[in-house]
Amino acid sequence: MLLQERPDTRAQGQALAAFGLRLEAQEEPAAFMVWPCVMPGLALFADCMTQWQSGFGGPVGLRYEAVKAVLEIRDVPRKEWPALFDDLRIAEGAALAYIDEQRPVELTPTSPAAKPH
């Protein structure tokens, strides 16, 4: 699966140094626990991370035909697909909500935020 605990920063630093670049210190990501019952869906989501369908405003959702291909490639028993798909949709929704929160707010003359108080 694509999930890993921590990147090899030493190897990254050496690769960057070959191009005259250096790796800046990064903040350690917050640790969190994933319930074992959620791991299969989260692993499927990670396997599908390059399969986003994009519109003019950015990602709009995963390409579900690609999700089916991943399930088949991973030899996941078909009876497990509905539950995994439900978990995937939850992760997809959370990712889209996060992506939407990161977008800059554009003020237009008709938006409530643009009206003078």
Image (cartoon, rainbow, N blue to C red):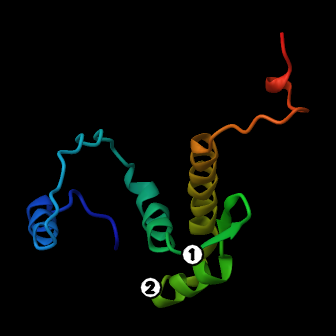
How packed mark 1 is, by other alpha carbons closer than 10 Å (few <14, some 14-19, many 20 or more), is some
Which is nearer the eye, 12 or 115?
115
Which is more foreground, mark 2 or mark 1?
A: 1
Identified at 62% across, 44% down, the residue is: 103
In screen coordinates, is 56 left or right of 52? right
Quadrant position of residue 14: bottom left
| Percent coordinates x, y for residue 84 in the rendering | 56, 67
Badge 2 marks a residue whose secondary structure is: loop
Tag of residue 74 = 2
The label number, if any, that marks residue 69 in the structure image: none
Q: Secondary structure at mark 1?
A: loop
Q: What residue do we see at 83% from left, 9% from top?
A: 117
Residue 69 placement: quadrant: bottom right
Residue at 28% in and 43% down: 29
Name the residue tied to disc 1: 51
The location of residue 66, given as percent across then percent down, is 60, 82
Cα–Cα gap, marks 2 and 1: 16 Å
Q: Which mark sits nearer the N-terminus, 2 or 1?
A: 1
At x 37%, y 49%, the residue is 34
Q: Is residue 4 left or right of residue 84?
A: left
Q: Left or right? Give the position of 95 relative to 114.
A: left
Q: Would residue 38 appear left or right of 93 to someone viewing this image?
A: left
Could you tell me the amino acid type at mark 2?
A: Arg
The residue most toward the right is 110
